[in-house]
Image: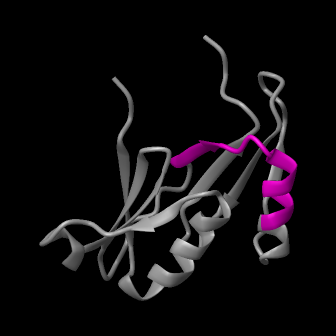
Amino acid sequence: MSLQHVSVELREDATDAEVAFWELLGFERVEPPPPINEIAVWVQRDGTQIHFLFTDEPVVPRGGHVAVVAEEWQATFDRLRDAGFEPEEHRRAWGAARAFVHTPGGHLVEFMEYPPVR
């Protein structure tokens, strides 16, 4: 079993900026099927999707976050910084480079060089 998608709330007018952010992490916009395409936008990478559900007053958790693996970690860090975001590097809890950054919609994203090993 694998995680197929995560849903987060977003103001509809923030869609373009949010999608552009996720493209920096290797995701691409995909069209949701009707009638979902009237209430959401999706991005996808390697079969995993982020669903942005439109709402006028999105709830953005303070500590809750989405985490993704960025194999080219330094290039990803630099790309985000060069695009005007402020990624913040954190300690290497399992030896992998890790950083956190906020999306245009205010959501917290962790990106890491590789996941923890079980």
The answer to whether 88 appears left or right of 55 in the picture is: right
Give the residue drawn at x 47%, y 56%.
61
- Which image quadrant for residue 84? bottom right
- Note whether 59 is above or below 16 in the view shown: above
Residue extending furthest toward the left: 35
Q: How is the image coloured?
A: one colour
Image quadrant in which the N terminus is located: top left
- Which image quadrant for residue 43? bottom left
- Note whether 32 is above or below 90 in the view shown: below
- Which image quadrant for residue 76? bottom right
The answer to whether 106 appears left or right of 58 in the picture is: right
> Quick check: is 77 in the magenta stretch?
yes
- Where does the image place residue 35, in percent across and percent down from the top left? 12, 72
Give the residue drawn at x 80%, y 46%.
73
- Where does the image place residue 5, in percent across and percent down from the top left? 36, 46
Image quadrant in which the C terminus is located: top right
Residue extending furthest toward the bottom: 13
Q: Which residues are magenta?
A: 64-79
Residue in the foreground of this view, choosing between 114 and 109:
114
Give the residue drawn at x 18%, y 69%.
36
The answer to whether 17 appears left or right of 112 in the picture is: left
- Where does the image place residue 16, in percent across and percent down from the top left? 50, 83
Give the residue drawn at x 20%, y 79%.
38
